[in-house]
């Protein structure tokens, strides 16, 4: 697992208060991890902070799963 | 109109969490006022407050995790957290749990706050100034909105009846109980979870009241002496925080399910001073009319009121104006009633004061004992002939109790509770 994936999962665990084992790459923030729309906004802010990037609103709307987040961040930091 | 009784009580105050714990300490004459250590007070003239004790190490300490998951705690400011805690105790105490949708729709919430999420607004403002709007949490607004105390309690417990909130500064808690009782009396609900909550003991809150020259500044080295209503040495109020929540219920509804009934809420009076934004009218006319209206509604004479829980904030001007208004209505000897200010023990809980003090008044009826006015060592001139219950609690007959709350803006509320026989 890449460093980015690990950091993303750590943030998800902290912000959504879910067990680490549940945070698989295919897990959907809303459907699988109990997040609501405001949680996902905050999650995106946490990713921005952690990785020092900016995630525009139209991109943020497409980040629905753990993998979506990892892929987006990887594309930004590549 | 339908009759309304009190069937559940919940408290979070500087004396700790829990009604019985609070009451035992209050009757024992314990002070909940201490030096402020949570934030910097080096440049603020008042350095003491009534702070809710936290953690498992202290008896009666407030434990946020007991009510809200750590993940959700950051979405709510402390005033909401205290309300959730006090409501939890009151609801469990009442034993009320709606069995179906119909009952849920007849159960409502009316919890108010004087100031709301001041610490959250402060933090949000600093963050906005330093890092810009993109760093502001989506939970910022809902963490600070006053009616979110009622909102969260309704969401946690599934109450779908009237969801309302009162904002009348330091009379909030009293207005909330009075208004909620009205909703039941008028058949808009059968059960209302009602009260006030406040958590403004913060750098911004303290500095703000200090700027208004409202706070005690002479007892920073002896915090437990700072709140001293009616005493010659009083020099301003002491901020407090916490929440008081009650379960109000229509009489027949309570009887039918065999609920324990603490007291009946029989009187509610309101008035406006139309005088000044922060000072009470010198003739005490607003408080006088509020009390008179509450007694009239209760159908009680002054000699049937045995205990008066005063607004009594320990300010040089306000205490004697209130006493003057009480004397005008009750006579110089207060018609034999005892009158004390429990703010001497917990400070001024602002929007929570009225509901916390209503609970203390109800307990005085339950246990036939009236709580003391702490630090009343050298009574002010003008207090002669009034039993202000100095220093020690007093066992006495209490058939009915009157609780006063007055707020900035010249708003007044009085509640009357009567022993339920």
Image (cartoon, coloured by chain):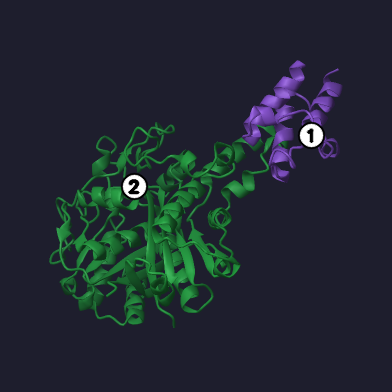
Chain colours: A purple, B green
| Separation of residues labelled 2 and 1 (CA atoms) | 50 Å
Secondary-structure class at tag 2: loop
Q: Which residue is mark 2?
A: B238
Q: Is disc 2 surrounded by few (<14), some (14 to 19) or many (20+) residues within 10 Å?
A: many
Q: Chain of mark 2?
A: B
In this orientation, which residue lies closer to the viewer: B259 or A67?
B259
Question: Which quadrant holds residue B102?
Answer: bottom right
Q: Which residue is mark 1?
A: A65
Question: Which quadrant holds residue B340?
Answer: bottom left
Q: Taking B8 as reference, is B70 left or right?
A: right
Counting from the top left corner in percent of width and height, residue B284 is at 32, 69
Write the residue at 35% across / 52% down: B348
Secondary-structure class at tag 1: loop
Question: Which quadrant holds residue B138?
Answer: top right
Counting from the top left corner in percent of width and height, residue A12 is at 68, 31
Q: Quadrant of the N terminus of chain B?
A: bottom left
Q: Are marks 2 and 1 on the same chain?
A: no
Q: How many marks?
A: 2
Write the residue at 24% across / 37% down: B222
Asked if residue A66 can be seen in this view, the reply is yes
Write the residue at 75% across / 23% down: A52
Q: Are marks 2 and 1 in contact (CB under 8 Å)?
A: no
Q: Taking B246 as reference, is A55 left or right?
A: right
Write the residue at 38% across / 65% down: B7
Q: Taking B46 as reference, is B224 left or right?
A: left
Q: Nearer the viewer, mark 2 or mark 1?
A: 1
Asked if residue B351 can be seen in this view, the reply is no
Counting from the top left corner in percent of width and height, residue B232 is at 19, 52
């Amino acid at each position: 697992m890449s460093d980015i994936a690990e950091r993303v999962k750590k943030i998800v665990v902290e912000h959504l208060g879910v067990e680490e084992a549940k945070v698989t790459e295919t897990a959907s923030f809303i459907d699988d991890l109990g997040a609501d729309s405001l949680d996902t906004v905050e999650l995106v802010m946490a990713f921005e902070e952690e990785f020092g990037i900016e995630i525009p609103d139209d991109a943020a709307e497409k980040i629905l799963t753990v993998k979506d987040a990892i892929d987006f961040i990887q594309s930004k930091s590549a | 109109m339908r009759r309304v009784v009190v069937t559940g009580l919940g408290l979070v105050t500087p004396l700790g969490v829990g009604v019985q714990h609070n009451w035992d300490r209050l009757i024992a004459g314990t002070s909940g006022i201490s030096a402020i250590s949570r934030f910097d007070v080096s440049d603020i003239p008042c350095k003491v407050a009534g702070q809710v004790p936290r953690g498992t190490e202290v008896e009666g300490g407030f434990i946020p995790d007991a009510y809200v998951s750590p993940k959700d705690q950051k979405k709510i400011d402390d005033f909401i957290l205290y309300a959730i805690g006090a409501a939890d105790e009151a609801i469990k105490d009442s034993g009320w749990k709606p069995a179906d949708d119909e009952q849920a729709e007849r159960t409502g919430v009316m919890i108010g706050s004087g100031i709301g999420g001041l610490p959250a607004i402060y933090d949000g403002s600093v963050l906005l100034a330093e890092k810009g709007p993109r760093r502001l949490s989506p939970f910022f607004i809902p963490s600070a909105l006053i009616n979110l105390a009622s909102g969260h309690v309704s969401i946690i417990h599934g109450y779908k009846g009237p969801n309302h909130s009162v904002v009348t500064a330091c009379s909030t808690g009293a207005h909330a109980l009075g208004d909620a009782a009205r909703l039941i009396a008028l058949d808009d609900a059968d059960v209302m979870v009602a009260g006030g909550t406040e958590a403004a003991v913060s750098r911004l809150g303290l500095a703000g009241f200090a700027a208004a020259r409202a706070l005690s500044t002479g007892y920073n080295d002896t915090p437990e002496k700072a709140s001293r209503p009616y005493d010659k040495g009083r020099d301003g109020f002491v901020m407090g925080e916490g929440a008081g929540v009650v379960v109000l219920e229509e009489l027949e509804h309570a009887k039918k399910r065999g609920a324990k009934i603490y007291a009946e809420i029989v009187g509610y009076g309101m008035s406006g001073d139309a005088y000044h934004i922060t000072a009470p009218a010198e003739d005490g006319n607003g408080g006088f009319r509020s009390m008179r209206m509450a007694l009239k509604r209760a159908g009680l004479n002054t000699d049937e009121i045995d205990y008066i829980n005063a607004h009594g904030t320990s300010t040089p001007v306000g205490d004697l104006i209130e006493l003057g208004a009480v004397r005008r209505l009750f006579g110089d000897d207060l018609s034999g009633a005892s009158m004390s200010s429990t703010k001497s023990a917990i400070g001024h809980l602002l929007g929570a004061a009225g509901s916390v003090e209503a609970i203390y008044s109800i307990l005085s009826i339950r246990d036939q004992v009236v709580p003391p006015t702490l630090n009343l060592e050298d009574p002010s001139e003008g207090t002669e002939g009034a039993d202000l219950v100095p220093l020690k609690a007093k066992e006495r007959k209490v058939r009915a109790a009157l609780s006063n709350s007055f707020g900035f803006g010249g708003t007044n509320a009085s509640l009357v509770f009567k022993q339920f026989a």
